[in-house]
Image (cartoon, rainbow, N blue to C red):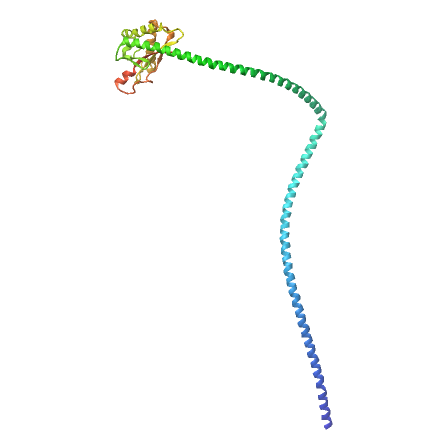
Amino acid sequence: MALGRTRSRRASIDIWPGFVDALAQLLMVIIFILLVFTVSQFYLSDALSGRDEALKQLQQKISALADELALEKQTSETLRGNAAALAAQLKAAQDERDALNTKLGAAGQQSANAQQTVDAAKAQVEELTAEIASLKDQLAKVAAALDVSNATVKNQQDQIVELGKKLNLALASKVEELARYRSEFFGKLSEILGNRPDIRIVGDRFVFQAEVLFEPGGADLSDDAKKQLNPVFTALKDISSKIPPDIHWVLEIDGHTDHRPIHTDQFASNWELSTARAISVVRYAIDQGIPADHLAAAGFADKQPIDTGTTDDAYRKNRRIELKLTGR
């Protein structure tokens, strides 16, 4: 029995060290595995970090490539448009080339006729060149003749200017001489007629009031009116006999009315009345021996009043016959 307990104790003592060894070995294995796992984790983390950086760079490259792809697409669209335009231009150029080829073919058929036409045109050009040369010679001769003519014209113009000056001097002399005879004529009339209120001098005119010569609304000279005019024509005949023949004088007789209108069977307006009165005086002057070519009659109606008033006195002043000795 004691032997059995001793064997049992030995067996128990022999198992424990092996168990401890096994446990130590297992612990070492676990530690090794943990160490391997840790190292693996480190390398895996580093690898993952590098992968993320690579992925980031890859994404940046993809984005850049996408932008480049969009730009390329836009460029491609532009190129397609340009290609279409160029294709259209090419088609138009080809059509134009075909048309030109057609024309050239037709021209080739007409080349013989065209050459004849060109030869004929050259001949015409030569003829025209000769004609132009001839015309140039003629033009030179005409220019020379024109220079001579211009010189002659200038000389004539100078002569005309000189003659004009002489004529103006002569006319001025004649006007002065006529003015002297007119002054003498008016002086004699003033002496003959005296200071009558119905006959007065206004400027270079003798003015007879219409009532002195005509009935109201009439244009016939009465016997008394003729007596009033006789001294005028007597003085004029006396003066005219002294006026040289080269002084062309005229006794101008003007008829005037007031502005009140007249409308009768004989006179449709004041124009007819004023003109008829002037003509009556002219006719009587001719009867008295005044040459007709030294007489003139004019009617002014009411258009040249000497008094713009509306009183009876203003109307009386405006109804008048004016006599003026003037040049023609």
Q: Is residue 97 visible?
A: yes
In the image, taking residue 162 as reference, residue 87 lies left or right, namely right
Q: Quadrant of the N terminus?
A: bottom right
Residue 96: x and y in percent read 67, 34
User: Foreground residue, 8 or 262?
Assistant: 262
Q: Quadrant of the C terminus?
A: top left
Residue extending furthest toward the bottom: 1
- Classify residue 307 by image quadrant: top left
User: Foreground residue, 301 or 80?
Assistant: 301
- Classify residue 16 by image quadrant: bottom right
- In the figure, 216 relative to 107: above or below? above
- Residue that appears at 62% across and 17% down: 137
Residue 293: x and y in percent read 38, 7
- Residue that appears at 70% across and 28% down: 107
- Classify residue 213 by image quadrant: top left
User: Foreground residue, 126 or 79?
Assistant: 126
- Residue that appears at 28% across and 16% down: 317
Residue 138: x and y in percent read 61, 16
In the image, taking residue 65 as reference, residue 221 lies left or right, namely left
Residue 3: x and y in percent read 74, 94
In the image, taking residue 48 as reference, residue 7 lies left or right, namely right
Q: How many numbered discs?
A: 0
Q: Is residue 269 visible?
A: no
